[in-house]
Image (cartoon, rainbow, N blue to C red):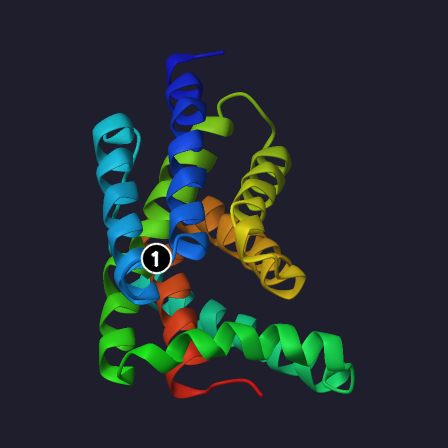
Amino acid sequence: MGPESRRAILTLPAAYALWFFTFQVPVLDFWIRITISASILLVIAVVFGRKEISIRPTATAVVVGVVSAVLLYLFFWSGYQVLKGLPQFTGQISSVYSLKAAEPVSVIATVLLFPIGPTEEIYWRGFIQNALSKRLSTRGSILLTAALYSSIHLPTLNPALMLTAFIGGLAWGFVYHRFGLAAAMVSHTLWDEMIFVFFVIG
């Protein structure tokens, strides 16, 4: 195992601890907790993965990010239309949206724009997936990173959210591999804004 992969793996317990704090420790407001956790995750990624992380914003990256975010949103919107008759499923979706109640929409939109959306891509794709790709195949690194990204949401006790994270992780992993970190950051951040702020599902 190379030094990049080793550094990445050694930071995972901290990432899991931060998301446990975010979803299970009842201090402060949820959006304050996740902002703190995302900011710490950004510091971890920059300190331990700065030599591997490469952000190259281009017009192509922006276009790909926007298009992929819209397609991913439409995928989840379509899935909701198919499954909305299942009370357990809709209850899990409603519990996610209940997190919006404590803060004004403008605050939520701001922290999704930064640090939450970009930071998750910098850490999970720019750092973790990049490091794993040096040991695994492209498909393997995308799948494992998506699985890890999904499992970090285990403290939510919400299967629908974990499945959403896994599918999103696969999509952003592919975008990162083909078009770079900037495209994945745009895609993730815009998708967050669409699904949480502008075009709420359900």
Q: Which residue is mark 1?
A: 185
Residue 145 horizontal/vertical position (percent) = 54, 40
User: How many numbered tags mark residues here?
Assistant: 1
Residue 134 horizontal/vertical position (percent) = 48, 23
Between residues 109 and 174, which one lies in front from this camera angle?
109
Residue at the image point whose x is 37% and y is 71% from the top = 190
Between residues 198 and 25, which one lies in front from this camera angle?
25
Examine the image and state in which quarter residue 163 appears: bottom right
Q: Residues within 10 Å of mark 1 (few under 14, many from 20)?
A: many
Residue at the image point whose x is 58% and y is 49% from the top = 154
Above-or-below relation of 1 to 72: above
Above-or-below relation of 28 to 195: above
Identify the element where label 1 is drawn. helix
Residue 51 visible (yes or no)? no
* Residue at the far front in the pictured view: 26
Examine the image and state in which quarter residue 58 appears: bottom left
* Residue type, mark 1 in image: Met
Above-or-below relation of 4 to 192: above
Q: Is residue 61 left or right of residue 114?
A: right
Residue 196 visible (yes or no)? yes
Between residues 166 and 90, which one lies in front from this camera angle?
90
